Image (cartoon, rainbow, N blue to C red):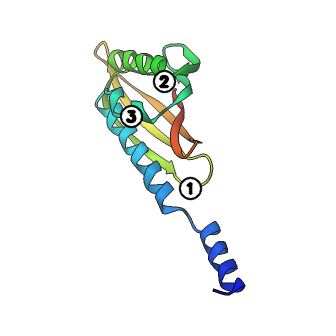
Amino acid sequence: MNKSLLIIFFLINAFLPNKENDNEITAIFSRFETGIKNANVEDFFSDLDGEIYLSIKKGVSGYFSSNQSYYLLNDYLREYSPLSFNLYKKETEGDYPYGFGSYYYKKKGIRGNSKVFVSLKKNNSSWKISQITFD
């Protein structure tokens, strides 16, 4: 193979979206949506980074381990029982994938809603959830 073909091959691969990354990121967003809808943090627990930034309505905000985040999110989803949830905006390309969603819940018989933000970062060779915000 001559040098020009190698350079062209490299440039094409460098600037085309990486479908493998997109598939992995889409799968993480899908597990996150399912877990929130079903109030089951276990669905996306393996996707949490070792330390994530978590901010939830009930006054919890800061960096927590994945285990601490599990319990905090679990408690939140029990108190603010999900009625529906979907990520209406997902950005899967680039170095910092993210999603925005609408979370509708019921707390003590009263309905409410929150905006949700989730972002990912590359951790070694895989993508992990690095931030979750319920506002």
Disc on res. 44? 3
Disc on res. 66? 2
Question: Which residue matches tag 1?
Answer: 93
Q: What residue is shown at x 38% (from left), y 15% (from top)? A: 75
Number of the front mark, 2 or 1: 2
- Where's residue 17, x and y in %? 56, 64
- Where's residue 108, x and y in %? 30, 12
Task: Give the structural element (helix, strand or loop) at label 3.
Answer: loop
Q: In which quarter of the image is the N terminus?
A: bottom right
Mark earlier in primary sequence (2, 3)? 3
Number of the front mark, 3 or 1: 3
Residue 71 appearing in the image: yes
Q: What residue is shown at x 69% (from left), y 78% (from top)? A: 7
Total number of numbered labels?
3
Q: What residue is shown at x 39% (from left), y 48% (from top)? A: 27
Please rate how many residues cluster around mark 1, counting C-alpha atoms within 10 Å: few if below 14, some from 14 to 19, many from 20.
some
Using the rendered view, name the quadrant where residue 43 is placed.
top left
Q: In this view, does 33 lie above or below 16?
A: above
- Where's residue 66, x and y in %? 48, 24
Q: What residue type is labelled 3?
A: Phe
Q: What residue type is labelled 1?
A: Glu
Q: Is residue 4 left or right of residue 110?
A: right
Mark earlier in primary sequence (3, 1)? 3
Marks 2 and 3 close (CB-CB < 8 Å): no
